[in-house]
Image (tube, rainbow, N blue to C red):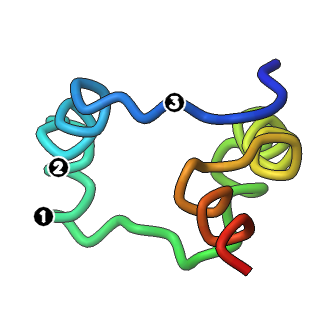
Amino acid sequence: MKYGLRRPSPAKSLAARLSWRRYLRHSLGLKAPRGWGWLTDPRRAAYNRVYNRTTVSWRTLLRWLAR
């Protein structure tokens, strides 16, 4: 598990947008509403919850420093 500052990865961002799984899910209309990750994949939802609370994006850090 990562703690601290996140480093953006353009390659991973592009790969996520061009994912065949994402395309298939969106074209078939099989998207679950926001917050339903606990039903679709509880293990990933738990990981993401901890990750999002223990790391900070560089944009948030800049916004916080600009105060």
Residue lying farthest top?
A: 1
49 left or right of 23 in image: right
Query: Mark 3 or mark 1: which is in front?
Result: 3
Read off the residue under disc 1.
Answer: 27
Question: Tag 1 or tag 3, which sits nearer the N-term?
Answer: 3
Number of on-image labels? 3
How far from the left and from the top, in percent, is residue 9?
Answer: 35, 28
Disc 3 to disc 1: CB gap under 8 Å = no
Disc 2 to disc 1: CB gap under 8 Å = yes
**Frontmost residue, 66 versus 54:** 66
Is residue 61 placed above or below 12 in the rendered structure?
below
Q: Mark 1 Cα within 10 Å, few/some/many (few <14, many 20+)?
A: few
Query: Which amino acid does the dot numbered 1 rest on?
Result: Ser
**Frontmost residue, 51 versus 67:** 67
Mark 3 to mark 1 CA distance (whole Å): 31 Å
Disc 3 to disc 2: CB gap under 8 Å = no
State which quadrant residue 15 falls in: top left
Tag 3, which secondary structure? loop
Q: Which mark is residue 24?
A: 2
Mark 3 to mark 2 CA distance (whole Å): 28 Å
* Residue at the image position 61 percent from the left and 35 percent from the top: 6
* Residue at the image position 62 percent from the left and 71 percent from the top: 63
* Residue at the image position 72 percent from the left and 48 percent from the top: 56
Q: Mark 2 Cα within 10 Å, few/some/many (few <14, many 20+)?
A: few
Q: Which mark is residue 7?
A: 3
* Residue at the image position 22 percent from the left and 24 percent from the top: 11
Mark 2 to mark 1 CA distance (whole Å): 5 Å
Q: Mark 3 Cα within 10 Å, few/some/many (few <14, many 20+)?
A: few
